[in-house]
Image (spheres, rainbow, N blue to C red):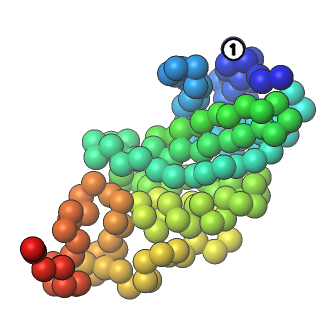
Amino acid sequence: MALTNEFLISVARNAAPGCTHVEHHGDLTIKVEVDALHNLLSEFKENPQTLFNQLMDVTAIDWNTPPDRFEVVYTLYSIEFATHLRIKVGVREDRPHVPSVVEIWESANWYERETYDMYGIIFDGHPDLRRFFMPEDFMDSDGTQLYPLRKDFPLMGIPGSLPLPPKD
């Protein structure tokens, strides 16, 4: 039996009183502040009435609008109740930090590394936060770290880094 959105919202409000929610075509997204993130995710995993025991994905969205330029998105699944849930947390451009959730779900290790590598979001407390796909020295000519999924990354890549295929 799937969990109702109303029930999930009530659980979220008990764990993180300031959270908000959005429903779109029946899918629920709960938005939470960074300081309440860990508590909310722990509650959804440990609560016997929700049991979101599977972290399916962690990624980010670059809205390219300060101050909350990024959103980190957690996709959860409850095997017991066959229910999906999305949690979002806003992240400031000038302080791209969120707490790591590796101690809640071990699988977050890889997802957080990938999100760091592609967007530059720093997961505080991560046991081994380093680049995943890109080389450690993936930087601009001035030494600034580059993150390929940010909206300000050059669409054609870094000039002179790789030859482009010939035009037909």
Question: What residue do we see at 34% from left, 74% from top?
Answer: 145
Q: Which residue is mark 1?
A: 6
Based on the displayed image, in which of its 4 quarters is residue 41 positioned? top right
Q: Who is closer to the viewer here, 114 or 99?
A: 114
Report x, y in % for residue 58.
58, 52
Question: What residue do we see at 90% from left, 32% from top?
Answer: 48
In this rendering, the answer to whether 38 lies above or below 162 is above
Q: Secondary structure at mark 1?
A: helix
Please indicate whether residue 110 sits to the left or right of residue 105 in the image: left
Question: What residue do we see at 63% from left, 74% from top?
Answer: 128
Report x, y in % for residue 65.
28, 42
User: The N terminus lies in which quarter of the figure?
Assistant: top right
In this rendering, the answer to whether 157 lies above or below 104 is below
User: The C terminus lies in which quarter of the figure?
Assistant: bottom left
Residue 44 shows up from this direction: yes
**For the residue carrying disc 1, how many other residues have a C-alpha within 10 Å: few (<14), some (14-19), or many (20+)?**
few
In this rendering, the answer to whether 127 lies above or below 151 is below
Please indicate whether residue 11 sits to the left or right of residue 73 in the image: right
Question: What residue do we see at 36% from left, 54% from top?
Answer: 94
Q: How many tags in the picture?
A: 1
Report x, y in % for residue 71.
45, 44
Residue lying farthest right?
48
Report x, y in % for residue 89.
52, 40
Residue lying farthest top?
6
In this rendering, the answer to whether 79 lies above or below 15 is below
Amino acid of disc 1: Glu
Residue 35 shows up from this direction: no
Based on the displayed image, in which of its 4 quarters is residue 120 positioned? bottom left
Q: Who is closer to the viewer here, 5 or 119?
A: 5
